[in-house]
Amino acid sequence: MITVQNLTKKYGESIVLNIENLEIPKGESFGLVGNNGAGKTTFFSLMLDLIQPTTGHINNNGVQVDASEAWKPFTSAFIDETFLIGYLTPEEYFYFIGELRGQNKADVDNLLAGFTDFFHGEILGQKKYLRDLSKGNQKKAGIVASFIGNPEVIILDEPFANLDPTTQIRLKGIIRELAASKEVTVLVSSHDLIHVTEVCERIVVLSKGEQVKDIQTSKETLKELEVFFGG
Amino acid sequence: MLKHFLTLEWKSFFRSASFKANLAIKIFMIFGALYFMVVFLGLGIGSFYIIEKQGWGDPLLVVNQFMIYYLVVDLYIRYMLQKMPITNIKPLLYLPVKKSRVVAYSLGKTVVSFFNRSHAFFFVPFSIVLLIEGYPPIGVIGWHMGIMALFYCNNFINVLVNNKDNVFYGLLGVVLGLGICQYYELFNITVYTSPFFKALYEMPWMAFLTWGLLISLASSAYIYFKRHMYLDAGLAGKKSMAKTEDYAWLNRFGNLGTFLKNDIKLIRRNKRSKTSVIMSFFFIFYGLLFFTGGIEAYDGPVWKIFAGIFISGGFLFSFGQFVPSWDSAYYPLMMSQNIRYREYLSSKWYLIIIATVLSTILASFYIYFGWDAYLAVIVGAIYNIGVNSYLVLWGGAYIKTPIDLSSNKKAFGDKQAFNSKTLLLTLPKLILPLGVYALGHYLISPTAGYIFVAMAGIIGFGFRNKVFAMIEAIYKKEKYKTLAAYKQKS
């Protein structure tokens, strides 16, 4: 589904990302971990063509993302609050994304109905604009919006941060379900080693822009990661 | 402690993103500031003699008469523009600093603000002229001190009523009504207010009254903020009740409708965009300066077109100029969503067109000044639709200033909006139509001038697809730079 080749990103002299070769097959749940400045968000921004690679390319389902926009219909993401439109209510925001992705109101309502638990009664019908919601609730809205329109690739940057424990557990369930269908490729980054090892089939560790580990998740993975980051 | 506060202030000023403008713009701004200083100084010195020469009566009395409006306008400008002192003190709340000091410092900061000092440019020279012209010094000093105190009162009134929109607009309505009454000589408020200002001069001890008022306002602001210095009280931002709105009637326009819906919400729900639209409404009346012959310099026939372009193009200039910055807060979303640039730009373009047509219809009262005047408006509108609408979208690609929708700061212009490319683009927006008209007017006839300008608009309209493709390419080219620029909040 996604292939990365000789991808580098430089700012001046410093190399912030350098991935020689990476393949993410369709339907994989892919986790990206690393300390601050490891290049996680840079990689996701490159995947969404928000910044330009210094060298190399990313191919998303055969589309070179910095050359064509054809990846947009089947790719969705929630990176940070710049993916939210502050002056809309959550409903309006969902319908807006829905319309852009060819979903009518009923389709969106259908999808949202499946997330009643996840929303915990704090998102829909609150008479609040997105800008007035708490950080955690904003994140919930953004994550669910990225599920609208049956995307084949979903990119979530730090989805667990700022969420309350109940919601974290529910989100893990949702990501596992998506991965189980083998139709959707989910890319998740996190600082929380326990969360990623629980939901991702495969984990790649970035350090200072370099890919230092590529692990198929097993029972020992968490230990291995803890040793790596602890040492 | 004060030293710490001041260094913080110093750093926040010199490290702000907007300060890093290039040298040319800084020089340009310094000249601009100097220009306004000279104008105000000139006004302060000259107004005494102008009023005397025009035979309107004792200059001091005339100034006193209009003082009430001056004060209200000052309050209005403050309300719209002056930043509240409380916004920056959140990080100080939990530090070992006495609350009273933080409040005193924040309020003190408003006292030295430009909004207070600027009036001195007029009143100091005016008072000096009064002294030179032989008005008794004690009276003049009393008057001057009294008036100055009133401006500082405004400062604290603004701090106290900040964000109370209904109070404010109510007051504004009353003053507007009074102004109209005065104009039509129904009722003259200045008859009641000017004796007060006059009394400051005749009985200089009265100045102590205004200073007393100032002190009580300042201390009540101090007490108010000290008591309400909690995140959920005085420091809380205003939250409005949200209502989900549909605008289902726009659905028939497909993807274009989706964006139009969003743009309407954008305009209605954000302070900054609302201000822009209100401003664009006032552009409609700009033509009064031209068509009433109020200003001699504007009497040349060519200026009619200039007026026409501004009357119909208020929205185009105040809103259109800042596309795509209006969407700066969520530009990464727009760039990664399933959106084609063409549709995004088209929706903004339609918005500009609709607003231009509306302004033209609203401006139909210019028929009162003759069909010729209204014809200039219509021709200006055609040029705006056919040429300027593209030019503002084009220029927008180069204005990479993020807009903070929730604040009115910088609503009246931003330094970064003046880069060389956008300046170059104003030439075809304003000067070219004047030239085209002049060509027709002086070579053939006034009618030919109108036809020429309108033709330019119609030709431009015809090339719509070509021009859009070009603008789209520019937006694509600038995309990464724009995203990076929006990332650093000013």
Image (cartoon, coloured by chain):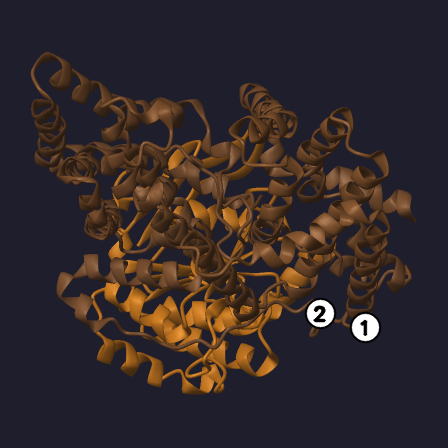
Chain colours: A orange, B brown
A215 vs A4, nearest the viewer: A4
Residue at 89% across, 58% down: B101
Q: Is residue B454 above or below residue B437?
A: below
Question: Is residue A22 among the parts visible in the rendering?
Answer: no
Q: Label 2: which residue? A: B234
Q: Is residue A208 above or below residue B31?
A: below
Question: Is residue B432 among the parts visible in the rendering?
Answer: yes
Amino acid found under the numbered disc labelled 1 = Arg
B438 vs B423, nearest the viewer: B438
Q: Chain of mark 1?
A: B
Q: Chain of mark 2?
A: B
Residue at 34% across, 51% down: B281
Quadrant in the picture for the C terminus of chain B: top right
Q: Is residue A138 above or below residue A4?
A: below
Q: How many marks?
A: 2
Amino acid found under the numbered disc labelled 2 = Gly
Residue A17 image label: none
SS type, badge 1: helix
Q: Label 1: which residue? A: B227
Residue B300 in the image: state x and y as whole percent. Answer: 27, 21
- Point out the tag, 1 or 2, that comes first from the N-terminus: 1
Residue A139 in the image: state x and y as whole percent. Answer: 50, 69
Residue B44 in the image: state x and y as whole percent. Answer: 65, 30
Residue B196 in the image: state x and y as whole percent. Answer: 71, 55
Q: Quick check: marks 1 and 2 in contact, CB under 8 Å?
A: yes
